[in-house]
């Protein structure tokens, strides 16, 4: 379904398990950034009523996930650390088409968002299937389903609004680009790291 070319090595979970506090903090900030991204698209595309409605709901869900992760951090006697840079997302951002029409920019922003959600979904699946902590295994399984829904939302709107744009061709380009950078990741206890 997701079309990603390279799966995360399950041994990445061993790195994650060595520092659960770090993955949870990084994950919390990923959820906050996802909510901010959705709201940013609302601000920049208010004339797409269906998109605005869907992204408001998505932003609320991402903030709920942020709260859930924060609650896990608190329950484990830890505190939310400072925001982390997401080098993977920053590298994806470089590939985004920043020229062209507003419509082309919207479609590429939707595909950029779909890619992040696809990889997050894949990482959560890897965590849910390999982490030894049963609470976190269930938590990441539930979030995997949610991330798959977000991926579907973003790619669906790209196809819906991408009239005159070969969205499937551009999505294949995104997949190829992501495949070329993902080998640099999966080596740290962060969601995309």
Image: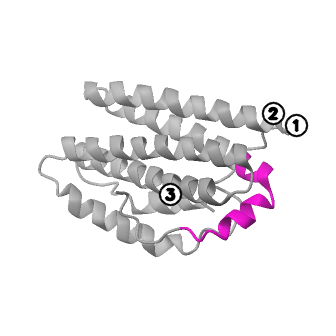
* Residue at x 33% of width, y 57% of height: 97
Q: Are marks 2 and 3 in contact (CB under 8 Å)?
A: no
* Residue at x 55% of width, y 68% of height: 8
The picture places residue 109, in percent across and down from the top left corner, at 36, 48
Q: Nearer the viewer, residue 17 or 94?
A: 17
Residue receiving disc 2: 74
* Residue at x 13% of width, y 46% of height: 163
- As drawn, 71 above or below 146: above
Q: Secondary structure at mark 1?
A: loop
Rounded to the nearest angstrom, the CA distance separating label 1 from label 3 is 28 Å
Do we see residue 83 in this rendering? no
Q: Earlier in the sequence, mark 2 or mark 3?
A: 2
| Residue 77 numbered tag | 1
- As drawn, 189 above or below 141: below
Do we see residue 6 in this rendering? yes
Q: Quadrant of the N terminus?
A: bottom left
* Callout 2 crowding tier (Cα within 10 Å): few <14, some 14–19, many ≥20: few
The question of residue 107 being in magenta is answered with: no
Side (left or right) of 79 relative to 9: right
Magenta extent: 8-24
The picture places residue 154, in percent across and down from the top left corner, at 34, 43
Instruction: Name the residue at the right extreme.
Output: 77
* Callout 1 crowding tier (Cα within 10 Å): few <14, some 14–19, many ≥20: few
The picture places residue 82, in percent across and down from the top left corner, at 76, 44
Q: Are marks 1 and 2 in contact (CB under 8 Å)?
A: yes
Q: Secondary structure at mark 2?
A: helix
The picture places residue 128, in percent across and down from the top left corner, at 61, 53
């Amino acid at each position: 379904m997701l079309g990603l070319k390279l799966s995360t090595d399950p041994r990445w979970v061993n790195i994650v398990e060595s520092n659960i506090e770090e993955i949870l903090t990084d994950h919390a900030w990923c959820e906050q950034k996802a909510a901010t991204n959705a709201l940013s698209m609302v601000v920049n595309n208010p004339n797409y009523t269906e998109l605005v409605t869907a992204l408001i709901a998505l932003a609320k869900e991402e903030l709920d996930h942020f709260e859930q992760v924060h609650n896990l951090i608190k329950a484990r006697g830890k505190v939310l650390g400072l925001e982390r840079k997401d080098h993977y997302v920053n590298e994806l951002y470089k590939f985004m088409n920043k020229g062209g029409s507003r419509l082309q920019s919207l479609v590429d922003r939707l595909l950029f968002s779909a890619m992040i959600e696809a990889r997050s979904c894949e990482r959560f699946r890897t965590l849910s299937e390999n982490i030894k902590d049963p609470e976190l295994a269930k938590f990441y399984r539930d979030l995997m389903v949610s991330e798959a829904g977000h991926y579907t939302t973003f790619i669906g709107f790209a196809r819906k609004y991408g009239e005159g744009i070969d969205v499937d061709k551009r999505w294949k380009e995104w997949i190829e680009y992501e495949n070329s950078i993902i080998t640099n990741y999966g080596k740290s206890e962060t969601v995309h790291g």
